[in-house]
Image (cartoon, helix red, strand yellow):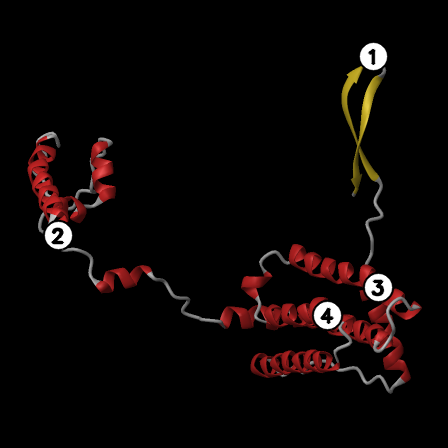
Amino acid sequence: MIGGLRSALGVLALALLLPGLSACGGGDSKSLAEKMAGDPEAEALAKAGYKPNPKPRPEGLPPPTDAEFKAWDRKDPEGEKHLYKFDKANLTKMLNYWKELDCFREKMKSEGDKVLGAEPGTPLEEQWIVFKQIFIPMVNTWQQRLLATEPRILEKSKLIGHFLEAHELVMNGWPDAYNNNDKVAIATADAHWTIVENKIIKYLKNISQEELPKDDLTDPKVKEKHDKFCAAALNPPKNTGKAKIKYVGKGSGGAKKLNMGDD
């Protein structure tokens, strides 16, 4: 009985208090629901004094139509034909890049096969580690040099996409598989390379009569030429220019020399 009386008195006190709270709101006639329905961002901008300044539009001019918006979405009328033109005009150079990648594949698999089943800490494993420390940065530099020489090749060529896919196999696919002594992963990388190769073969048939060069390594003369080409690809020329010397401000001891590195 006493508990029920206290509850009733609490409700009555709250009812008497609400009008007072409403009066303390500064005369704001908006209800809570109306305030919640408003745009907080718009209210904040209005309080900050922001006034929208819409661009003038002539009276009677209808809004843009879907056709007008679509007109701004330009499409290349030739589609991918400009890629075909570039690859066809530069086919010898492009296929030379692929041949270099094939040399990298051969070297990676040759060294990787040696370490299969080797125990940790053995000379074979140490040899594999040293090989990767030299070989992988070299292959990475090959890609950097290609993109620096051909700064817009990614938008000009369709072949370059296949080349970069193959490059990723040499850089990561096979090394990871050999690191884990995973024969299934090695076979998967081999199959992936074949898929990329077949994409290139199909593409070449579409743009020219040229076939993907495949050296017959059973012919001693062809093998000798192939090995010479791969040796050059695996040992790119280094910067051999003389260091630039730039003279800066003169002091009591004469001009100071600042080494700028190799040319």
Return the x and y of residue 91 as percentages of the image width and height: 65, 72
The secondary element bearing badge 1 is classed as loop
Return the x and y of residue 244 as percentages of the image width and height: 80, 36
Give the residue drawn at x 58%, y 58%.
152
What numbered label is drawn on residue 176? 4
Q: Is residue 113 at least partly visible in the picture?
A: yes
Q: Which residue is mark 1?
A: 252
Disc number lying in front (3 or 1): 3
Give the residue drawn at x 12%, y 46%.
2
Q: Quadrant of the C terminus?
A: top right
Q: Give me the C-alpha separation between circle 1 and circle 2.
A: 76 Å
Q: Give me the C-alpha separation between circle 3 and circle 1.
A: 52 Å
Q: Give me the C-alpha separation between circle 1 and circle 4.
A: 59 Å
Mark 1 Cα-neighbour bin, 10 Å: few <14, some 14–19, many ≥20: few
Q: Which residue is mark 2?
A: 61
Residue 89, compared with residue 24, is above or below; it is below
Q: Which residue is mark 3?
A: 129
Mark 3 Cα-neighbour bin, 10 Å: few <14, some 14–19, many ≥20: some
Taking the image as shown, residue 244 lies to the left or right of residue 38, namely right
28 or 233, nearer to the observer: 28
Of pointers 1 and 4, the one earlier in the residue sequence:
4
For the view shown, which residue lies furthest in the right direction?
Answer: 123
The secondary element bearing badge 2 is classed as loop
Of pointers 3 and 4, the one earlier in the residue sequence:
3
Label 3 close to label 1 by CB (< 8 Å): no
Q: Amino acid at mark 1?
A: Ser
Q: Give me the C-alpha separation between circle 4 and circle 2.
A: 64 Å
